[in-house]
Amino acid sequence: MRDGSPQVAPVWVGREGDLLLVGTGEGTLKAKNTRRDEQIGLSVIDQQNPYREAQIRGEVIERRPDQCLEIMDAIAHKYTGKPFPWGVGEGHVVLVVRADKVRYSELLFEHTRP
């Protein structure tokens, strides 16, 4: 944020080799914050076992326009098995993130669903 505090929001994450892809609209707070400061932090939780996670600190190294939502469709398929639910993404951008520091952890709990 402007005062240096982190902005936190759940996001879908795609991969392109060692790079991470995060979609957003150019007018969002996430896009505005990363224009001002390219540093970014992500916490990735395993959907099957929420006690398995990766903490990633990195930098936005590229902003890719994604008007036709081609990249977001691929990411949506990963999470839902379907295309991204919104039509043409005017002003949509994909933040390309280089991970500078990655920490993996897994707590030895057995995950049970209520």
Image (cartoon, rainbow, N blue to C red):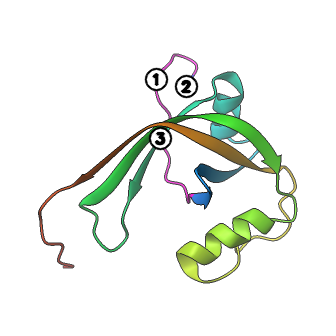
**Disc 2 from disc 1: Cα separation:** 5 Å
Residue 109 drawn at (x, y percent): 12, 65
Q: Residue tagged by mark 2?
A: 1
Q: Is the stretch drawn in magenta largely helix, strand or loop?
A: loop
Task: Name the element at disc 2.
Answer: loop
* Residues drawn in magenta: 2-13
Judging depth in this view, the residue of 13 and 16 nearest the camera is 16
Contact? badges 2 and 1 (CB < 8 Å): yes
Say the numbered circle drawn on residue 19.
Answer: none
Residue situated in front as seen by the camera: 102 or 77: 102
Residue at 80% x, 65% y: name it. 69
**Does 1 appear above or below 114?**
above
Name the spot of residue 37 as percent of width and height, x first: 63, 23
How far, Cα to Cα, is label 2 from label 3? 10 Å
Query: In which quadrant will I find the N terminus?
Result: top right
Which residue is tagged 3?
A: 8
Identify which residue, 22 or 9, lies in the foreground: 22
> Is label 1 in a helix, a strand or a loop?
loop
61 lies left or right of 57 = right
Q: Which residue is mark 1?
A: 5
Measuring 64% from the left and 30% from the top, which residue is drawn there?
33
Specify the amino acid type for callout 1: Ser
**Marks 1 and 3, how far apart in space?**
10 Å
